[in-house]
Amino acid sequence: MANLSLQHIEKIYDGGVQAVWDFNLDVEDGELIVLVGPSGCGKSTTLRMVAGLEDISSGQLIIDGKDCTRLPPKDRDISMVFQNYALYGHMTIYENMAFSLTLRKEKKDIIHRKVMAAAEILDLKSQLNKKPKQLSGGQRQRVAMGRAIVRNPKVFLFDEPLSNLDAKLRGSMRREIMLLHKKLNATMMYVTHDQTEALTLADRIVCMSMGHVQQIGKPIELYEHPANTFVATFIGLPPMNMFDGKIEGGKFVSELFEYPLTADQAEKLKEYEGKDVILGARPENIVREGTIPFVVTNNENLGMNTLVHGKIDGKKIVVCKFAEWCNYKFGDEIKLGFDPERMHFFDKETTQAII
């Protein structure tokens, strides 16, 4: 396995369109890094630059201390798993998994040993004589992973490998990738637009937007301490509720409600007296012991939790997540409050986190 260092990486296409801006990341040996963000944010472009499928416009890519910025893909010792499997339909599963080793003219006994070892890890031994069309989507994705494993690369790259699978199968394959990472102790970079995948898989997450890195950290860090409003609303499902207002006399004051600050919040926000800020509240940190009138529009029971959608003052749409089964009806009114220890405040102008 290997460590990677991406230093001031940028990608500028013909015509001056810039897809990635000043990307910096050090990946430790055996670490699983997930790049997450909306479509077009530059995450797949970054992965393809690491793989050598896209030229690096500026910056350096270091793999195990070696400058690989201008090396062709075949010399980087990297394997990539794509969204569409990219299997050869006329070959058996065994032949698909052995293909890269066959091209290298490896000895047949070495090829067989490596293919069987990968098939054992991925529970594919009974499928080796079949063709790809005879396998399910999840099995095909495992074959694509097996093809990467047999090469024993320094780095594994995954480009949205679960996007073509249904929800149940995605959950199953997420668990398989986690187990694979533990078994191989492999260095991995994984790209997804699904923040659930990012939270469940990653040792660290790189959250991107419009070609810029917004925050890098452990999943819990991005969830509990988002760097800005983009990360706050992108990470977490349902997303964080946001309220515009001002700090006035020890309170957060908006057109919808007033929220009295705790002593700690007041101290940290004293420089924002009279200034515009944003109050952020995750759905699970909204409580039903409060003074804010809230009219229910939807009640979604999820078993142990209920998502309750509604409006404050007939204007602001808010989502609450209550840790029990609820049976609210359209038009029901309840009074909301906030867990004071779990509130977030952001600078309105910069969108950066204050608390």
Image: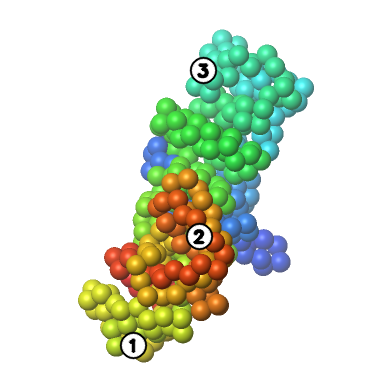
Residue type (three-letter) at the residue carrying disc 1:
Glu
Q: Secondary structure at mark 3?
A: helix
Residue 134 appearing in the image: yes
Who is closer to the viewer here, 63 or 66? 63
Q: Position of residue 202 (x, y in %)?
A: 44, 45
Question: For the residue carrying disc 1, how many other residues have a C-alpha within 10 Å: few (<14), some (14-19), or many (20+)?
Answer: some
Q: Position of residue 325 (x, y in %)?
A: 45, 51
Q: CA distance from mark 3 to mark 1?
A: 64 Å
Mark 1 or mark 2, which is nearer the start of the sequence? 1
- The circle drawn on residue 248 is 1
Residue 27 appearing in the image: no
- For disc 2, the marked residue is 328
Q: The N terminus appears in which quarter of the rendering? A: top left
As drawn, the residue found furthest toward the left would be: 263
Residue at the image point whose x is 41% and y is 67% from the top: 281
As drawn, the residue found furthest toward the right would be: 90
Q: Secondary structure at mark 2?
A: loop
- For disc 3, the marked residue is 120
